[in-house]
Each structure stands twice: as structure tokens, then as C-alpha cells.
Amino acid sequence: MPLRRCAGCGLRAPQAELLRFAARDGVLVGGRREPGRGVYTCRNLACFEGAAGRGMFARVLRQQVRVGPELLRLYTDAASDAGEAAVAQRKDFGVTNG
Ligand SMILES: [Zn+2]
């Protein structure tokens, strides 16, 4: 499992535990499949805000990027990470029940 460094707090963690971002047309977007250089943070809003506030996304990506407020959603969604599997199961359950 490759380790990646959080751009906010500097902690190293397995890639799968971090959120990945990349630049698309000068705008920071979240997503593991985004091409190009990636930048990572913990699933922790404080890490995102810290990275954004210190310009770490632009620094790691080596280009200017706009960091939009819509990215905050990734963290509020991820905050309930422990319940994510349960939610997915409930959704599946709902589908199978018609
Ligand atoms: Zn962090």
C-alpha cells in the first residue's frame, strides 16, 4: 500500500485513507481517477483548510489552482465514513426490495 503525505498536516498515511485531488483546467477537483499530479489530504476538514490556507495544493501540484468551496462536501460526506458501508448496504437493501 503506497503511502502519501497529507498536504494539510504532513502526516503520512496509506493512499486509500486519504482524499486525492488534482488540477483540471486550473481548478482543484477531487477524485482518484483524475489524471496528472495528485495531492492528498486526510479525511479531515482541518487538513483541507490548512492546505488551502497555506497554498499547499498549488505548491504540490506545481501550478495555480482555484480551490472552490464545493470541495468541502467531500469532507462532510467523509466525516460519516464509519457509517458509509452501512449506508451502502441500506441502499442495496432498498434496491433489492424494489
Ligand atoms: Zn492531515
Image (cartoon, grey):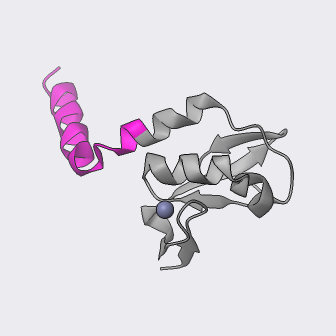
| Residue 96, x across and y down, in percent | 17, 30
| Residue 89, x across and y down, in percent | 19, 41
| Residue depicted at x 15% and y 33% | 93
Say whether residue 80 is visible.
Answer: yes
Q: Camera-side residue: 11 or 83?
A: 11
| Residue depicted at x 69% and y 38% | 67
Magenta span: chief secondary structure: helix
Left or right: residue 93 compared with residue 45: left
Residue 29 in which image quadrant: top right
Residue 7 in which image quadrant: bottom right
Q: Camera-side residue: 84 or 93?
A: 84
Q: Taking 95 as reference, is 31 above or below it?
A: below
| Residue depicted at x 73% and y 52% | 55
Residue occupying the far top of the picture? 98
Counting labels gives 0
**Residues drawn in magenta:** 76-98
| Residue 23, x across and y down, in percent | 76, 47
Q: Camera-side residue: 53 or 16?
A: 53
Q: Taking 59 as reference, is 25 above or below it?
A: above
Whether the magenta-drawn stretch holds residue 11 is answered as: no
Whether the magenta-drawn stretch holds residue 86 is answered as: yes
Residue 35 in which image quadrant: bottom right
The quadrant the C terminus occupies is top left
Say whether residue 32 is visible.
Answer: no
| Residue depicted at x 55% and y 65% | 6
Left or right: residue 70 compared with residue 39: left
